[in-house]
C-alpha cells in the first residue's frame, strides 16, 4: 500500500481536523503545514510533530508532499490550489471549494491541465445514516418526490465575527449560507435532481455589523417538478439541530442531525424497523452554536475516499465539479435576494 504524504495549507480551526483525519489513515502521513501567520503554523506543526513551512510555495516545492489540503479562508482557496496543480500535487479542499464560479472553474481547469486531482470536503455525505436514505430515494420508495427542504437554525456570537474574514464578501463569500448551511445545501445536491428556479430573501437581522447575511430563506423548484425550501441562519439563539425533509407520494424521510426521525413508506419492509432502531435516536448537535464542537471522523472518511480514488484511478465522488454545485445554488440565492427576481439555474 502506497503511503501518501500530506501538507496542510492554512493552520486555523479546521486545519486541526485535517491533521487528525490524516493521522487516522494507515496510508497517509502528515509531513507539514503552513500559514501566513508563522506562529499559528508552528503551533499546529508542534502539536502534530511535523514541519512548519514558511509559506505554501516552499511546501509545494518539497518532493516529500503528494497531497495538500486547503484550510485557508474560503476566498483564498484558488491561489494555493492552482499553485499545487502546477507543482504536481493533488488537492482536497475545504468547503466551499471557492466563493465564485469563475474561481472554481479556474481551479478545476488547472488540475485537469496538470493531470492532478481536485477534491472537495463535504463530511456530511459520509454520515452513516445517509446510506439508507440514498438507497430509499434512489430505489423509488418515496414514489413521486414532491418536496425536499433543509433547515439550519444555528447561532453564532458577535465574537465569532470579530476575526478578519468571517461574514465578509471577500474571504467568506457570504454568511450563514456559504459558511454554515452549505453542508446541507450539498445534501440537496447529493440526493435531489438539480434546482431549476429559485426565489430568495436574505437579511442581516441578528448581526447587523457584518457584510453578509446571517439569515436566508429560499423557495425553489427542482427539474423533476418537486418544490422545496432552504433556511439558514446564525441568528437563532441558542441554535437548533439541522434538519432535512423529503417526501413523496409513497413515503417520507426526515433527518435531524445525524439521525432519522421519520422513516415511513407505503411499501413497508422488515428492515425499516432496523433503520429506525439504528438511526432513530437524535445524535449530534455539533456546530449548532460552536464551530469547534464537531468530530473529525467524517473528515477521515472523506479523505479516505479521496485516497481510494487516487489509488484506483476512478473518479472521486466529490470532485471539483461536484463540489461546485452547492456554491452555484448559494450564489443564485444571493442573486435572487439582491435583484428580487426569480433566478433560473437549469
Image: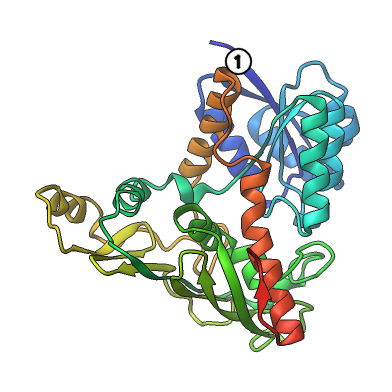
Q: Nearer the viewer, residue 155 or 50?
A: 155
Q: Residue at x 56, y 36 (%)?
A: 20
User: What kind of colouring is applied to the model shown?
Assistant: rainbow
Residue 305: x percent and y percent? 52, 32
Q: Nearer the viewer, residue 95 or 55?
A: 95
Tell me where residue 91 sits by quadrant: top right
Residue 253: x percent and y percent? 29, 64
Q: Count the labels in the image.
A: 1
Mark 1 — residue? Answer: 3
Residue 86: x percent and y percent? 87, 28
Q: Residue at x 83, y 54 (%)?
A: 102
Packing grade of label 1 (10 A; few <14, some 14-19, many >=20) is: few
Tell me where residue 207 sits by quadrant: bottom right
In this rendering, position of residue 304 left or right of residue 8: left
In this rendering, position of residue 112 left or right of residue 37: left
In this rendering, position of residue 121 left or right of residue 107: left
Label 1: element kind: loop
In this rendering, position of residue 196 left or right of residue 137: right
Q: Residue at x 85, y 65 (%)?
A: 170
Of all residues, the one furthest to the left in this rendering is 270
Tell me where residue 313 sits by quadrant: top right
Q: Is residue 192 above or below residue 87?
A: below
Of all residues, the one furthest to the top in this rendering is 1
Q: Is residue 147 visible?
A: yes
Q: Is residue 225 above or below residue 273?
A: below
Q: Is residue 160 visible?
A: no
Residue 41: x percent and y percent? 78, 40
Amino acid at each position: 500500500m502506497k503511503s501518501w504524504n500530506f501538507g496542510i495549507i492554512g493552520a486555523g480551526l479546521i486545519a486541526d481536523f485535517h491533521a487528525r483525519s490524516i493521522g487516522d489513515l494507515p496510508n497517509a502521513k502528515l509531513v507539514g503545514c503552513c500559514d501566513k501567520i508563522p506562529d499559528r503554523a508552528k503551533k499546529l506543526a508542534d502539536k502534530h510533530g511535523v514541519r512548519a513551512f514558511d509559506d505554501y510555495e516552499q511546501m509545494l516545492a518539497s518532493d516529500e508532499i503528494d497531497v495538500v489540503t486547503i484550510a485557508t479562508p474560503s476566498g483564498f482557496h484558488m491561489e494555493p490550489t492552482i499553485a499545487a496543480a502546477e507543482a504536481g500535487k493533488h488537492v482536497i479542499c475545504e468547503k466551499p471549494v471557492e466563493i465564485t464560479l469563475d474561481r472554481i472553474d479556474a481551479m478545476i481547469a488547472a488540475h485537469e491541465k496538470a493531470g492532478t486531482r481536485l477534491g472537495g470536503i463535504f463530511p456530511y455525505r459520509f454520515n452513516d445514516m445517509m446510506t439508507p436514505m440514498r438507497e430509499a430515494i434512489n430505489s423509488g420508495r418515496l414514489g413521486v418526490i414532491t418536496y425536499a427542504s433543509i433547515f439550519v437554525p444555528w447561532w453564532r456570537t458577535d465574537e465569532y465575527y470579530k476575526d478578519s474574514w468571517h461574514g465578509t464578501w471577500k474571504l467568506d463569500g457570504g454568511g450563514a449560507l456559504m459558511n454554515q448551511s452549505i453542508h446541507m445545501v450539498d445534501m440537496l445536491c447529493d440526493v435531489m435532481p438539480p434546482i431549476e428556479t429559485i426565489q430568495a430573501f436574505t437579511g442581516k437581522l441578528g448581526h447587523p455589523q457584518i457584510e453578509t447575511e446571517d439569515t436566508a430563506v429560499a423557495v425553489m423548484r427542482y427539474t423533476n417538478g418537486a418544490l422545496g425550501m432552504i433556511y439558514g441562519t446564525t441568528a437563532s439563539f441558542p441554535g437548533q439541530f439541522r434538519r432535512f425533509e423529503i417526501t413523496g407520494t409513497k413515503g417520507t424521510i426526515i433527518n435531524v442531525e445525524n439521525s432519522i426521525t421519520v422513516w415511513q413508506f407505503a411499501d413497508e419492509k422488515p428492515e425499516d424497523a432496523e433503520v429506525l432502531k439504528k438511526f432513530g435516536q437524535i445524535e449530534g448537535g455539533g456546530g449548532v452554536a460552536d464551530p469547534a464542537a464537531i468530530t473529525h471522523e467524517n473528515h477521515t472518511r472523506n479523505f479516505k475516499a479521496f485516497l481510494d480514488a487516487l489509488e484506483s484511478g476512478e473518479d472521486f465522488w466529490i470532485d471539483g465539479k461536484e463540489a461546485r454545485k452547492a456554491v452555484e445554488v448559494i450564489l443564485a440565492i444571493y442573486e435572487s435576494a439582491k435583484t428580487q427576481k426569480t433566478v433560473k439555474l437549469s
